[in-house]
Amino acid sequence: MRVTDTGGRAVTDAVVTLVVRGAASGDARRTPARGPASVRVIDQRALAFTPYVEVFRPGDEVVYRNSDRTRHHVYSFSPIKAFEFVLAPGEQSAPLKLERSGVIAVGCNIHDGMINYLYVSDAPWLAHTDAGGMARFQGLPAGEFDVRVWHPRLPPKRPDLMQSGIALRLDEHRSLDFAVTLLPDSRRQFDREHTRY
């Protein structure tokens, strides 16, 4: 799966999910086994969250670490998981359990340009695109799938982009392309801490 913008440039940090289409064949109903819940670390370095987008399964946990030399006030008002805490340099948060599916936008109340997204999904197959705009899935069974693409810079209040009824044969190597229109990157906007008064 390759995601590009309308100019043909690779789009990193797009989340791609695959779901078996309604009356698919018996092979496609086999879903991958879920491993144990995992803990992922979101670092704060050079006044940015790294990674910008991270994918989770319900039950996974996230830890925020401050590798900067300044304080960060990490918060989210998301109805899926609201939280806030202040991290001094070198500190990290206690693990936060993510129980529900959805998107959690996280910011820093001190540094306006800092934002990251936690994408929590129970879709059977889930990945996000790398620097080349590629999301890779292996071991897919034969059948029909709905493929969805989400990115934080898609226009708001619109559903994920979707291609329906993509038929795959067992062991088929196939590439799908999505072209998306993205809004400007909000991380590069005005930051009051770096403005002279």
Image (cartoon, rainbow, N blue to C red):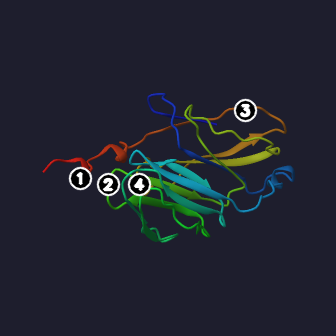
Residue pointed to by mark 2: 112
**Is residue 122 left or right of 140 when viewed as pictured?**
left
Say which of marks 2 and 4 sits in front: 2
Q: Is mark 1 on a helix, strand or loop?
A: helix
The earlier-in-sequence mark between 1 and 2 is 2
At horizontal 25% and vertical 52% (from top left) the residue drawn is 193
The earlier-in-sequence mark between 1 and 4 is 4
The earlier-in-sequence mark between 3 and 1 is 3
Say which of marks 3 and 1 sits in front: 1
Residue pointed to by mark 4: 156
Q: In which quarter of the image is residue 99?
A: bottom right
The earlier-in-sequence mark between 2 and 4 is 2
Amino acid type at image mark 1:
Arg
Relative to 83, residue 180 above or below: above
Which residue is the extreme one toward the top? 8
Give percent across and percent down for residue 163.
61, 44
Question: Which numbered circle lies on residue 174?
Answer: 3
